[in-house]
């Protein structure tokens, strides 16, 4: 079903995605809380705890938007290193580098503002980079880890984004992807479909006066490959130890893999 949206051609998709995130940027964080009733925070915590960030790492968060994943990575690294040094900030701390890459500057600007409010912009290890997941500006084998949260379903050529993730990771580097996925359980699926197809666009209308953008978001979830198919695509990109874990019955799923 297309719920008011025509089949989108590949060329049109990038423009459409860019329009959607330009429009939603200023309301993005509040809408996330409303749409997921705050759950996105727990899902992001879970992604970052699976990542086990470490002190001195080079981390790339693609489609990083307003910084939610990057902030969590930094907070974890700081906690870990403070504990290890009994409260003193270790001198080698600034070896850590966290890059937030997003195709949309409006989202990045909201992120920079949030970083400023938290005092993170004083740290010289958080970098905001405008760029496309399909053509990253980072060097081969330069990152310890790559995350993408609620981003890959917006990318036009998923295989190309996966190939780029593989290219920029070091040997032993980890790929983790958090994405809205597919619910299998019959009754829960009906409730979830009803929620996403009627409640989310209405919330978009009410809060952001933008029903269409939120309708696009719901449609993009439906079009995204199943958990198994997506795992197959990650393996095809060259990753090993490919796994996925469903949360809330598949409402979201965390896929992971390692580059050996
Ligand atoms: N990761 C953030 C989070 O979890 O809150 C933001 C997720 S938001 C739903 C999706 C983001 O993907 C937007 O900021 C959008 O600009 C970005 N995006 C879409 N297509 C992209 C691409 N080809 N390359 C990089 N970022 C992209």
Image (spheres, rainbow, N blue to C red):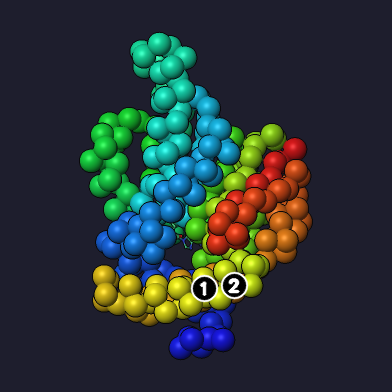
Image vertical order of residue 82 relative to residue 96, above or below: above
**Which residue position holds label 1?**
191
- Can the viewer see residue 100 in this picture? no
- Residue shown at 56% from the left, 33% from the top: 52
Whether residues under marks 2 and 1 lie with C-beta atoms below 8 angstroms apart, the answer is: yes
Drawn side of residue 192 relative to residue 129, left or right? right
- Can the viewer see residue 183 in this picture? yes
**Which residue position holds label 2?**
187
Q: Choose between 161 and 3: the one closer to the eye.
A: 3
Residue 204 position in % (x across, y down): 33, 73
- Residue shown at 39% from the left, 64% from the top: 35
Image vertical order of residue 39 relative to residue 75, above or below: below
Cβ of mark 2 under 8 A from ligand 1: no
Q: Which mark is residue 77?
A: none
- Residue shown at 38% from the left, 54% from the top: 38
**Quadrant of picture, ligand 1:** bottom left
- Residue shown at 41% from the left, 60% from the top: 36
Residue 11 position in % (x across, y down): 53, 77
Q: Quadrant of the N terminus?
A: bottom right
């Amino acid at each position: 079903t297309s719920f008011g949206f025509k089949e989108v051609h590949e060329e049109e998709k990038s423009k459409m995605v860019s329009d959607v995130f330009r429009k939603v940027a200023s309301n993005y964080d509040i809408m996330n809380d409303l749409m997921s009733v705050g759950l996105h925070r727990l899902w992001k915590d879970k992604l970052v705890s699976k990542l086990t960030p470490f002190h001195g790492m080079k981390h790339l968060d693609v489609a990083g938007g307003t910084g939610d994943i990057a902030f969590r990575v930094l907070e974890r690294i700081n906690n870990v290193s403070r504990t290890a040094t009994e409260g003193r900030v270790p001198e080698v701390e600034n070896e850590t580098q966290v890059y937030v890459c997003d195709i949309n500057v409006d989202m990045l600007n909201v992120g920079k503002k949030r970083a400023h409010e938290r005092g993170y912009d004083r740290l010289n290890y958080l970098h905001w980079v405008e760029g496309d997941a399909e053509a990253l500006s980072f060097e081969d084998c330069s990152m310890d880890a790559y995350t993408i949260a609620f981003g890959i379903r917006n990318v036009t050529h998923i295989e190309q984004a996966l190939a780029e993730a593989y290219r920029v990771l070091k040997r032993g580097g980890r790929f983790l992807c958090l994405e809205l996925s597919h619910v299998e359980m019959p009754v829960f699926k009906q409730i979830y479909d009803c929620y996403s197809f009627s409640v989310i666009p209405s919330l978009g209308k009410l809060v952001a006066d933008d029903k269409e953008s939120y309708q696009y978001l719901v449609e993009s979830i439906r079009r995204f490959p199943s958990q198994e198919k997506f795992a197959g695509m990650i393996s095809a990109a060259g990753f090993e130890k490919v796994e996925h874990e469903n949360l809330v019955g598949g409402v979201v799923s965390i896929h992971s893999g390692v580059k050996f």
